[in-house]
Image (cartoon, helix red, strand yellow):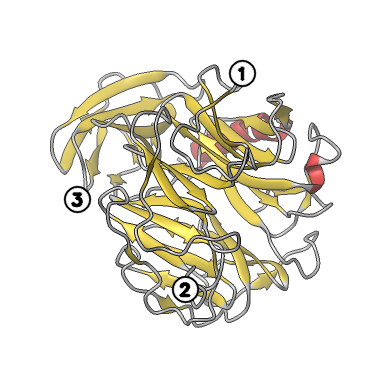
Amino acid sequence: MTLRIYTIFFSLIPFSLAAQWTPLTTGLQSIRSMTHLGTDLYAATYPSGVKKSTTGGSSWNAVNNGLPMSGSNIFCESVGYNGAYLFAGTQSGIYRSNNGGTLWEVANGSLTASSTVYANKWFHFSGTTMAVFAGSVAAGGGMWRTSNNGTNWYIGHSGMGSNVTVYHLTPVGSTLYASTSVGIYTSADNGLSWVVHPTVNYATYSIAQVSTTLVMTCTFGYRYSTNGGSTWLDASGDPASPTEGELIAYDGILYANTGTSTGCLRSTDNGMTWSAYNTGLGAIDQTALEEFHVASTKLYVSALFDIYYINGLGLGAPAHDEVNTAAMFPTIFVDGFTYTDPNATHGELQLIDMQGKVVHSIRISSTAQWIDRRGLASGTYRVRLNNTNATLRDLGTVIAQ
């Protein structure tokens, strides 16, 4: 069994290591963030509002009807989605669209909106949409949550101090990790309340998990933990004293957007060592990367003058913005495995082979269901749930012996 697993693991490495960044050649500028809804791509461009591509990024059109204008400008800082709505964070407040950006409506309530305090990043966890704001809690920023698509907003930073600025959210199993200006906070109740992580009380900009290792970028550089964050070790090859940065795990490899002239870094050993990974990036864009985004089997990064991507398998990449409450056991199986999810919505469970082809589809009708092998060939398969609302969730991998 051990030999079989090692053979599968090493067969993945050449594919991932051979990849490089490819420009979409969008013609867009100042791309603050991007998202996807189905097969359509969306980009928040500053100060030109939201652009949409239905052609995989080869052509883009403005979808700004209803967004606030200041003269001829639309100061849009972010765009995200929750499976039902698109959300745009602007300097005039939060806007939403339920028709692919054809029409936007204000959904800001009484939240602060200014040139310094605005919805900067979007996440969606177990039916709750969370807006991470630029600006501290005291300034009206922090984090806000909604369970009805922005009709009502509630405090999402309960337990955090007034001096806290939130930078990023990361699901690790059923726990949420918040990277903030004063350290790490964790939440076991989907963001209703937060507690201080006992070993990190300094500025932390992003966290990622690969295998069983936690990795963070913080004011002291990049650090990793193999014991759930009880202790942290310093990485090598990382920038000294960063003031920003975003991490993501994709195909079992870690990528870091440094936000500086260092550009993109990559680690193939669970965050212990880092090296430059900038091949394909424009010279200026290398110094002006914005945010990562995973859509299907592509890892994207937005930048000042373009969007770039890496083709991959998506193995090990977290569902874009879902806490994964699903479980599959055994993950190395002979006859089949059991799928469970207490928060399951009815849909279709798909098994995807190493070439990206859906080879097995099963209709899900309960929170615990046996998945029969039914002649499936030996190998590694990515498991994906296609919900009834057409939202795709990557659930992890299983191995058929």
Q: Residue 220: in sight, yes or no?
A: yes
Locate residue 216, reporting x and y percent. Answer: 61, 64
User: Which-is-in-front pick, marks 1 and 2?
Assistant: 1
**In the rendered view, does 233 fall on the left or right side of 374?**
right
Residue 240: percent from left, percent from top: 81, 68
Please identify the residue farthest to the front as the structure is shown: 71
Badge 3 marks a residue whose secondary structure is: loop
- Is 31 positioned to the left or the right of 381 in the image? right
Q: Residue at x 79, y 31 (%)?
A: 280
Rendered-image quadrant of the C terminus: top left
Residue flagged by tag 3: what amino acid is it?
Answer: Pro
Q: Which residue is mark 2?
A: 185
Amino acid type of disc 1? Ser
> Which residue is pictured at 78% across the width and 63% down the height?
236
Q: Which residue is mark 3?
A: 342
At 13% from the left and 39% from the top, the residue drawn is 366
Dot 1 lies on which element?
Answer: loop
Residue 59: image tag:
1
What is the x, y in percent for residue 375?
A: 29, 18
The quadrant where residue 186 appears:
bottom left
Dot 3 alpha-carbon crowd within 10 angstroms: few under 14, some 14 to 19, many 20 or more: few
